């Protein structure tokens, strides 16, 4: 009898995922649901749009700023990581590419907050970078420009995410069938042509994953806009932190969270649609 | 045989129980909001002193983070423990900011203890009774007072501004040379903006006292519009420390800073001696940090003794004033006697006691304060 019970229990495989599903439910879905709920309700539980209104009224500039910063970063990120990955895959100088392969991985091990602090001393008007230019005679102290601000945020994001996306992309490139590249080379194709016509079309899905994940990461970073961004506009994470720290106002902070969730969801939808189209075409 | 073993075991277990009870370390839980230097002060300076005079007591210090956010965490924890109906709460002493101190009293989460301790009567400043319009008399002991002021590089600025009007003129002549951190990157910027409203919106006396009137905010449109104009001539800095950093690197020549942070950095050689302070008219706000003890602290008596030690004239002199360049929480007359003349004068070198009494304002009451910050977000930064 007992055996049949345990047999029955195992027969229903849903039980096997129960612990993991419970974890996801308690630690991810419940808080997510709760903050979405809090974004659209008053304290007494009635539904309202006032928090979202306030979020747009006060922070519409910042929302736009966030989107622009993230998009610019992601475009630069794509160009740079494809370049590095292509160099590693196609360059004939093996020892050089090995050094490059080691170097580009470094930012992977440095947390965002450390990166932000590094960049803060590096990019400032009289920071390490400008001082190096001045010392080498390329600039005078009067010509130096501070990169603290929107440009600094983009530089930090790109520098930090470069390792991650290059790792994914060069991995995808390495996984391609080598014979295609050799065949193209035998027929006289240049390296650039091999990159654009043979390699890139095949790694588009991986590129998409790297970019979407990078966007979601950049949308969620607080330390960089706080430490490098100055004044206004600022990124949405800084606004959320400010709503909570300064006003104790979780509703509007959650409303901002809802907006940033929608932005990410929009990108994810776009990416999935592209992905499905490609699969359908094959 | 077995009975004997049993008795021995029971006796042994009983003895360990008894002995652990007799020698048990009582743990006094202290939660401190504020920057790391404040947590370090409680942990490395106050706690050993208290443990030395109270054998068997261990002080457990937890930092909850800088700014109002750190105080918020303490409040959230206390009200959660209150809501769940616990008999004993696990915070005995808390160090909180002025705004949250008032809210804690309003929510009935704090014990009225000031008359129980000897140092209670040494307090003279208004902030011990009034926290942004909320009556906190008896519930709080100021740990120290902190003040914001305008720091300037005396090598380049020979005639520092003495009022907001002069400052505005100065920035028109020297664009981008004045820097502050907006309102999202630190309290020195918030304080500067609050001072701006005191100067061009509504005076400090009205905004720092109740009752609240929602209509007052509508008269600030011009002040915010002028601030937006002012912001075009200045540099934004990334935070309180960021302002001092930029002053140090010569990227700006003037900016609002916390007085204690300024003097500490100066002492450590992180900013040049040519930097000086000026407290401008009609005034800039400062704030105290409070020592409080929750209504249901597990060790109420120890908590009172701890606060009594922390606010004694010796500790205030050597810890608060000498180490941190903060203005003392208790009446300065009690502290002056315990300090050497040089240290005392350093504290009032550039901002005289007279300046402090004329231009040292407090922050506005909670609702006005929120109006100022939201007004800034709505009219200046958006």
Image (cartoon, coloured by chain):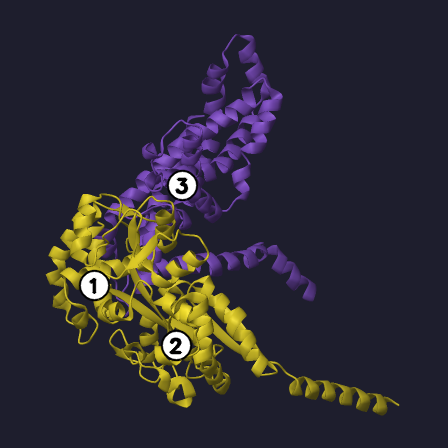
Chain colours: A purple, B yellow
Relative horizontal placement of residue B363, taking residue A3 as reference (left or right): left
Above or below — where is B274 with respect to B135? Answer: above
For marks 2 and 3, give the CA distance.
57 Å
Q: Nearer the viewer, residue A62 or A123?
A: A123
Tell me residue B66's x, y (percent). 41, 62
The subunit letter for the residue under badge 1 reads B
Q: Choose top left, top right, bottom left or bottom right for residue B307.
A: bottom left
The subunit letter for the residue under badge 3 reads A
Question: What residue would you read off at disc 3?
Answer: A215
Above or below — where is A181 with respect to A62? Answer: above
Relative horizontal placement of residue A47, taking residue B304 as reference (left or right): left
| Callouts 2 and 3 in the same chain | no
Question: What residue would you read off at disc 2?
Answer: B336
Q: Earlier in the sequence, mark 2 or mark 1?
A: 2
Tell me residue A74's x, y (percent). 39, 35
Relative horizontal placement of residue A7, taking residue B193 as reference (left or right): right
């Amino acid at each position: 009898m007992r055996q049949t019970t345990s047999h029955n229990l195992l027969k229903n495989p849903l039980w096997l995922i129960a612990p993991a599903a419970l974890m996801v439910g308690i630690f991810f879905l419940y808080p997510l649901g709760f903050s979405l709920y809090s974004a659209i309700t008053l304290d007494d539980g009635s539904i309202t749009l006032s928090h979202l209104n306030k979020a747009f009224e006060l922070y519409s500039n910042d929302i736009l700023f966030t989107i622009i910063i993230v998009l610019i970063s992601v475009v630069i990120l794509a160009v740079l990581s494809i370049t590095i990955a292509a160099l590693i895959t196609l360059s004939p100088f093996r020892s050089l590419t090995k050094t490059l392969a080691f170097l580009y991985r470094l930012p992977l091990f440095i947390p965002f907050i450390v990166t932000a602090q590094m960049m803060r001393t590096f990019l400032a008007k009289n920071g390490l970078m400008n001082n190096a230019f001045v010392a080498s005679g390329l600039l005078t102290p009067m010509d130096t420009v501070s990169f603290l601000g929107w440009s600094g945020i983009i530089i930090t994001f790109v520098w930090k995410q470069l390792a991650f996306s290059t790792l994914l992309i060069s991995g995808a490139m390495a996984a391609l069938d080598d014979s295609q590249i050799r065949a193209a080379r035998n027929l006289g194709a240049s390296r650039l042509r091999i990159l654009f016509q043979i390699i890139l079309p095949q790694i588009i899905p991986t590129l998409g994953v790297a970019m979407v994940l990078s966007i979601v990461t950049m949308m969620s970073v607080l330390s960089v806009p706080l430490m490098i961004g100055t004044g206004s506009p600022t990124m949405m994470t800084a606004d959320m932190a400010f709503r909570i720290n300064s006003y104790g106002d979780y509703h509007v902070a959650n409303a901002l969270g809802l907006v940033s969730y929608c932005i990410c969801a929009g990108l994810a939808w776009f990416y999935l649609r592209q992905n499905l189209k490609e699969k359908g075409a094959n | 045989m077995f009975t004997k073993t049993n008795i021995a075991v029971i006796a042994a277990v009983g003895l360990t129980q008894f002995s652990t009870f007799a020698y048990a370390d009582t743990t006094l839980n202290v939660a401190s909001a504020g920057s790391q230097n404040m947590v370090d002060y409680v942990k490395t300076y106050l706690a050993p002193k208290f443990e030395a005079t109270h054998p068997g007591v261990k002080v457990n210090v937890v930092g909850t983070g800088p700014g109002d956010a750190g105080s918020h965490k303490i409040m959230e924890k206390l009200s959660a423990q209150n809501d769940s109906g616990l008999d004993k709460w696990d915070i005995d002493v808390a160090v909180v900011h002025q705004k949250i101190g008032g809210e804690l009293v309003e929510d009935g989460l704090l014990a009225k203890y000031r008359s129980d301790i000897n140092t209670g009567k040494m307090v003279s400043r208004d902030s011990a009774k009034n926290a942004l319009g909320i009556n906190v008399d008896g519930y709080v002991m100021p740990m120290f007072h902190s003040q914001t002021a305008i720091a300037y590089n005396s090598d380049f600025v020979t005639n520092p501004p003495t009022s907001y009007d002069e400052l505005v003129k100065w920035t028109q002549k020297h664009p981008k040379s004045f820097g502050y951190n907006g309102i999202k990157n630190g309290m020195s910027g918030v304080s500067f903006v609050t001072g701006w409203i005191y100067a061009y919106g509504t005076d400090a006396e009205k905004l720092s006292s109740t009752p609240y009137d929602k209509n007052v905010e509508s008269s600030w449109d011009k002040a915010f519009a002028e601030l937006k104009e002012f912001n075009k001539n200045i540099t934004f800095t990334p935070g309180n420390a960021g302002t001092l950093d930029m002053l140090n690197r010569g990227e700006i020549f003037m900016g609002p800073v916390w007085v204690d942070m300024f003097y500490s950095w100066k002492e450590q050689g992180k900013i040049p001696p040519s930097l000086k302070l000026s407290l401008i008219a009609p005034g800039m706000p400062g704030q105290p940090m409070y020592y409080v003890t929750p209504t249901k602290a597990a060790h109420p008596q120890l908590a009172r003794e701890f606060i009594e030690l922390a606010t004694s004239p010796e500790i205030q002199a050597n810890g608060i004033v000498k180490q941190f360049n903060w203005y003392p929480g208790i009446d300065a007359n009690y502290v002056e006697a315990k300090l050497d003349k040089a240290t005392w004068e350093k504290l009032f070198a550039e901002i005289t006691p007279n300046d402090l009494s004329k231009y040292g304002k407090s922050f506005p009451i909670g609702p006005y304060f929120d109006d100022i910050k939201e007004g800034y977000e709505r009219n200046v930064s958006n």
